[in-house]
Image (tube, rainbow, N blue to C red):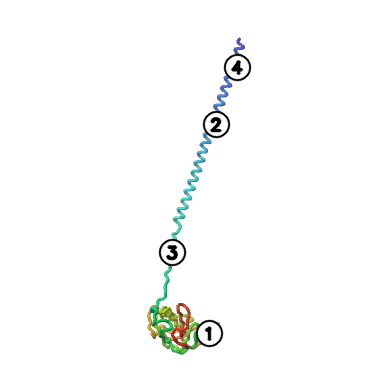
Amino acid sequence: MSEKTNGRENKNIKALFSVVCLCIISLGLIVYFSQGKTNNSTVNENQTLKVSTTRQATTEVQHAVTVTETTAKPAEPESSTEKKTTEPQSMPKGKNNTPYKSFYKYPLTEAVDRGYSEELSLDETMGDWRAHPAVDFKGSKGDDVIAINDGIVLDAYNDNMLGGVVIIDHGGKLVVKYCGLESISVKKGKRVDIGNKIGTLGSVPQEAAQNAHLHLEAKLDGKYVNPLNVMGKTE
């Protein structure tokens, strides 16, 4: 009986030992997997936090750059409309001052040294072929040059090629350029009456091969016209 009893007790002890081992192993596994889940959860949370923080930082940087660009961008200047200036008219267009019909005086003498021509011809002074959109009136140096009609002086200056120059708006869109003056008696913006002295005769450097003369150009509405036709004169 004792041997049987001892055998049973040994078997029971072994069974108990096996159960205890299994419990320990199970407990170890439970602890291991619990810790693994906790670590994974912590890692995932950390990663999520890092990604979220990175995205937020990136968004803030982009927003800051956008704000900086918006602030740094200079304001575009307001579009300004250029004021169109028109040459002053000496007198309103009417029956008494319409070019070709009004009374005009000769600016110097009636003698013409060289007439108006739109065709090219050999220029003795410059040595090239060019048109002559003007009338050259003969005279002597020091002779008085007068305004062919009432008007307003648009400009008065000296030119290396044309000598002393006076430009007068005679109304009706007629603008006349008096060239070859030695002295100038009028100023820009001043009004002149027909026959008023505007200067004295000198020379025209670009036409030095000719005798002393007044080089007279006329434009009607911006286009060259024969001054003699404007004045109702003929050569």
Labelled disc at residue 33 = 2
Dividing the picture into quadrants, the one containing residue 73 is bottom left
| Residue 133: x %, y % from top left | 49, 82
What residue is disc 3 on? Answer: 79
- The N terminus sits in image quarter: top right
Would you place residue 94 above or below residue 19 in this image? below
Q: Amino acid at mark 1?
A: Thr
What residue is disc 4 on? Answer: 11
Q: Are marks 2 and 4 in contact (CB under 8 Å)?
A: no
Looking at the image, is mark 2 or mark 3 nearer the viewer?
A: 3
Q: Residues within 10 Å of mark 4 (few under 14, many from 20)?
A: few
Query: Could you give the CA–CA distance between mark 2 and mark 4, rounded to whole angstroms?
Result: 33 Å
Asked whether 69 or 109 is in front, the reply is 109
Query: Could you give the CA–CA distance between mark 3 and mark 1, rounded to whole angstroms?
Result: 49 Å
What residue is disc 1 on? Answer: 125
Query: Could you give the CA–CA distance between mark 4 and mark 3, rounded to whole angstroms?
Result: 106 Å
Would you place residue 182 above or below residue 8 in this image? below
Q: Are marks 2 and 3 in contact (CB under 8 Å)?
A: no
Query: Could you give the CA–CA distance between mark 2 and mark 3, rounded to whole angstroms?
Result: 74 Å
Q: Are marks 1 and 2 in contact (CB under 8 Å)?
A: no
Q: Secondary structure at mark 3?
A: loop
